[in-house]
Amino acid sequence: MRFLFKTDYDQDIRLFQHGGQMFWYGLLAVVLIAAPFLVSEYVLSQMQFVCIYAIVGLGLMLLVGYTGQISLGHAAFLAVGAYTEALLQSKGVPFVLSISCAALFAAAIGVIVGLPALRLKGIYLAIATLAFNVIVEEIITRWDAVTGGSRGMHLKAVQLFGYPLTSDASFYYLCLALTALACLALINILRSPTGRAFVAIRDSEISASCMGVNLAKYKTMSFALSAALTGVGGALYAHKVAFITPEQFTLLTSIELVTIVIIGGIGSLHGAVLGAAFIIVLPQLISMAKDFLPEGAPAAGVQSVVFGLILITFIIFEPLGLYGRWIKIRTYFQVFPFYRRGTFQRQRAYLKSERLR
Amino acid sequence: MLGQSLQLLFAGVAQGCVYALVALGFVLIYKATETVNFAQGDMMMLGAFFGLTAATILGWPYWATILFAITVMAVIGMGLERVVLRPVLGYPTFTVVMITIGIGYVIRGIVTMVPGWGTETHALPTPFGNGVVRIGGAVIAVEQIAVIGMTAALVAALFLFFRFAKLGVAMQATSQNQLAAYYMGIPVQRVNMMIWGLSAGVAAFGGILLAPVAFVHSNMGFIGLKAFPAAVLGGFGSVPGAIVGGLIIGIVESFAGFHLAEGFKDVAAYVVVLAVLLVRPSGIFGETVSKKV
Amino acid sequence: MTFFAVENLGVRFGGVVAVDGVSFEVKQGEVYTIIGPNGAGKTTIFNLIGLIYRPTSGRISFEGRELEGAPHHVAERGIARTFQNIELFEHATVLQNLLIGRHRHRRTSLAEEILFLPRVRRAELAQRAAVEKVIDLLELAHHRDSMVAGLPYGVRKVVELGRALATEPRLILLDEPSSGLNPEETDDMAFWIEDMKKELGITVLMVEHDMNLVSRVSDRVLALNEGRVIAEGTPAEVQSHPAVVEAYLGGDD
């Protein structure tokens, strides 16, 4: 176990706490950059998906994991990003501008959703965002003239400063770069007053406001930031699949996005990325395991069951998600042989009620 | 004109009854455990499939089918509570909601894998036939009247149960104040289990009532998503609210489907719920509460 | 100009009158304590001052201007508070909790923070330096990087006091600072309250049950019963006031 002896305030806020961390993240960066030369085209394509989902996961983590607001409507922001990108590209707007617009427009919608959400708590907020998702989906389906309705929209490859990113590697680098930027932006926010205000709202709204945090302002801000990141993810997603229809942005997509956050581990940025990787890899694992399954079991059904079981298992046995599991394994080896089972025991109130009786 | 409105009203109320039953399931569980069961719609679907099996494969009469589906689902509901939900009692609401979403996935997946159920649509035979009743200028299907009547009967039975049965009173006490109920000697965890059973049974009943209106299909559980607005309209913790909310959503849908452009029918419920939440953040019958410091 | 004044404050919840026409003034630099039996409306008054509840009647003014708006406006005016049942940010470290206390001194914008410009870094270092003073004063260095959720009750109470002090308030509201503390910790609390008054020049308004602590630190005391003022004066005067004795011990009837 490593002990950090702090002699300087700067040590609390620098990006890497110690040299070891810098080494491992550096190594990770090298591997990710070298990936197009190391892995097959198929794996690379999946890695693009991981990056896209990681950006969305980071956005959702900011809202759910750090600000404590529930959203079951993030597929709507994904759709807003995707359709904005598709529309602007068809009008010949350059990519840098169009993806910024996708982010900004999603953020604006985020503010519109965030404002009524200020008064809503818990399950009411979940239902309101759910309703919002359904309404957005319906608008996209019916607004034929602009969105192509259920016929969908086609997209061309990204043109970055005049160069078309047609190869898998170039689009991968674009996704990777944006993921890295998203991570950095969130780390910066979280080590600044804004990020602390978010965490304060998550843990105790009443005492946050008594410390001078303007609840309305910061909740709206969190919705906007989260929606913006999801919008960026949506724009990339649209390019990745090259063909978008309203069915890709249903409530089920929203739930899938939330599971990224839950499985990855609520309240950690690592979790958002790990969760995204997990969601992408899981269907592959299931299709690989298909040979061992009884004849005639429909793939969709099997996937649904496995997905549900994993969700349940994680919440019951590993509430801190994949990242929490990793921390435990690491601690186990670091303190070997002194690890106790209770080290990470979570306090649990006997029905900690949000209701007053 | 009047006849037509009456006809729409009946169609809306019949559909609303199904929403109300699912919403009732939400409310029962929410009152007891502060959990919103996102698998309620899927439990309804599972109940409908059990009914289907009893009716078509075993060839049982309609009434036995209903009893069978309710019983099986009640047992499944209790089992779910014991195995999956009890370990997370007291966790944050959202965590438990995600668990129920997981349960929904599992149920939907399993149904598609069961031979004879699969991904096809099935029709559940009912004894009501295709008869109609004419009131004024309105033509009302006997099926709709049957749905309304059976829902009313169930609601009445539930009312009597909560009012007079010992278990019902214990359930009420538990949902009012779990800790106090526990101190008074009520076995809270067992009562919670019963509530899950009851809620699953109500869901099965709803599933069978829905069968004449829609077909039995592995995705019919998504109708549960329409019941959310119903439950929220009524204020999540209110049993009469759930019934009224369900009826409102059913009626609004029915009229929106007839009078407004295509597409409005499907979103009408959500537009209504968003509008209500903007004005009253805890629904129509919900009480506004704030944390005490 | 009065430093802090409450005039004819009243609130009712449904049919219950929780606070009924309460008026008092706090002078700058004093320790002013509100006492009273359970349900007398002490914490309700705090929640009215903090604008968590809306009063049905009356007004509250601080440094000559009326207090109005939302709870965060109160904090921005330089009034900090602690809570009876501790409302800390459980899933954050002690340091992070105290840093949230610095929120009202925030001068950087979101855009600057996303880029983490040198200006933000400098501001963050300055905030930490300010928080470190509080950590030193309250001897919290030992728990600096611990998660709040794992700390014992007594320490959490001190962390909450620290968070209020980190806002650099001119008026601090302490809601039962000694509840749940052992005699030794209560003793520390008394010292800190005196330090706040003498060294930091902070005016203290507190609700307290422990009469030893009250007589030791308070300059003036206000006694409440059933939402009404029954006595005001020095600790000794109030303690021997017949209405107070009756309120605590019950009447003859």
Image (cartoon, rainbow, N blue to C red):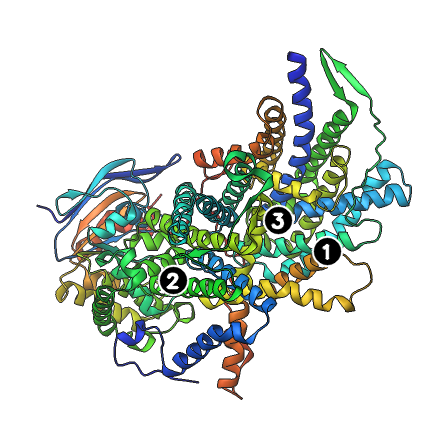
Q: Report the quarter where the N terminus of chain B lies.
A: top right
Q: Position of residue A306 (x, y in %)?
A: 68, 62
Disc 1 target residue: A301
The subunit carrying tag 3 is B
Respond whether the residues carrying marks 1 and 3 are from the same subunit.
no
Name the residue rendered at 42%, 71% in the picture. Answer: C150
Say whether residue A213 is left or right of residue B188: left
Disc nearer the start of the sequence (1/2): 2
Q: Position of residue B207 (x, y in %)?
A: 74, 40
Q: Nearer the viewer, mark 1 or mark 3?
A: 1
Q: Foreground residue, A177 or C128?
A: A177
The subunit carrying tag 2 is A
Kind of element beneath mark 2? helix
Q: Amino acid at mark 1?
A: Gly
Around disc 1, counting alpha carbons within 10 Å, would you say few (fewer than 14), some (14 to 19), or many (20 or more)? many
Q: Foreground residue, A42 or C155?
A: A42
Around disc 2, counting alpha carbons within 10 Å, would you say few (fewer than 14), some (14 to 19), or many (20 or more)? many
Disc 2 target residue: A186
Q: Is B222 placed above or below C162 here? A: above
Q: Amino acid at mark 3?
A: Phe
Q: CA distance from mark 1 to mark 2?
A: 36 Å
| Residue A286 visible, this angle | yes
